[in-house]
């Protein structure tokens, strides 16, 4: 089995078993550049629930073009854990982890709906690409289809409609094409 297959299988399930959602929260961790996949695998080996959303991109070299998977948010990964000293140390002692993102180095909990939005986008293989963070605009919700209930900020570019899904804590966003989807204002 290749490393990529092992990684995909290890990240297939991100919902913790036996941990109540009231007890645990999602947190963003800051990682060293280009260490996100390795850190995610190491944390899963330590029984820390992780989520590393990936984008497929085509990289061009002088002699070929190759489709590669890259982290949606470079230098960041997500962990679901109880905010306890031993759990924090498990994460912080992982080589390549620089710290938690948020206040007082303890990390700021990320709302479950933001992680769920990212999971929907990645699981449905919706064409998406990185987008500058947008804090102003119309907030909309998709109605129907595989992305039903997904919320974000609507951006119009000519005749093209795009939905921007934002991770507010990281000030990062992802843009999704809305061709064929019905939307409503939130």
Image (cartoon, rainbow, N blue to C red):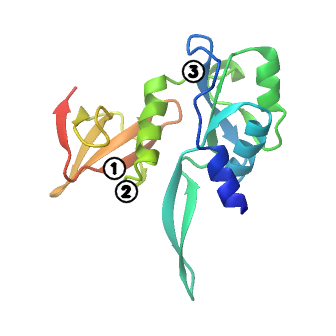
Q: What label sits on residue 76 in the rendered view?
A: none
- Name the outermost residue toward the top: 22
Residue that badge 3 annotates: 109
Relative placement, left or right, of 86 versus 60 is right
Residue that badge 2 annotates: 127
- In the rendered image, residue 49, in percent from the top left (x then y), is placed at 67, 31
* Residue plotted at (48% across, 22% down): 111
Upstream in sequence: badge 2 or badge 3: 3
Is 114 drawn above or below residue 125 in the view shown? above
Q: Quadrant of the N terminus?
A: bottom right
- Secondary element at image label 3: loop
| Measured Cα–Cα span from mark 2 to mark 3 | 28 Å
- In the rendered image, residue 75, in percent from the top left (x then y), is placed at 64, 46
* Residue plotted at (79% across, 38% down): 45
Proximity of marks 2 and 1: CB atoms separated by less than 8 Å: yes
Proximity of marks 1 and 3: CB atoms separated by less than 8 Å: no
Query: What is the crowding at mark 1: few (fewer than 14 residues within 10 Å), some, or many (at least 20)?
Result: many
Proximity of marks 2 and 3: CB atoms separated by less than 8 Å: no
* Residue plotted at (64% across, 17% down): 19
- Secondary element at image label 2: loop
Is 83 drawn above or below residue 139 in the view shown? above
Residue that badge 1 annotates: 176
């Amino acid at each position: 089995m290749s490393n990529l297959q092992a990684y995909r299988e290890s990240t297939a399930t991100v919902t913790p078993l036996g941990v109540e959602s009231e007890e645990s929260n999602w947190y963003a961790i800051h990682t060293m550049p280009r260490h996100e996949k390795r850190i995610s695998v190491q944390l899963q080996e330590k029984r820390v629930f992780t989520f590393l959303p990936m984008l497929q991109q085509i990289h061009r070299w002088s002699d070929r073009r190759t489709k590669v998977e890259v982290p949606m948010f470079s230098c960041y990964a997500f962990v679901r854990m109880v905010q306890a000293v031993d759990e924090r140390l498990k994460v912080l002692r992982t080589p390549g982890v620089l710290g938690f993102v948020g206040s007082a180095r303890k990390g700021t909990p990320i709302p479950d709906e933001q992680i769920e939005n990212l999971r929907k986008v990645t699981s449905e293989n919706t064409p998406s690409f990185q987008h500058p963070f947008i804090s102003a605009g119309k907030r909309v919700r998709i109605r129907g289809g595989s992305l039903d209930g997904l919320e974000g900020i609507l951006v119009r570019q000519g005749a093209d409609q795009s939905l921007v899904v934002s991770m507010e804590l990281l000030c990062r966003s992802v843009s999704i094409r809305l061709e064929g989807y019905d939307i409503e204002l939130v």
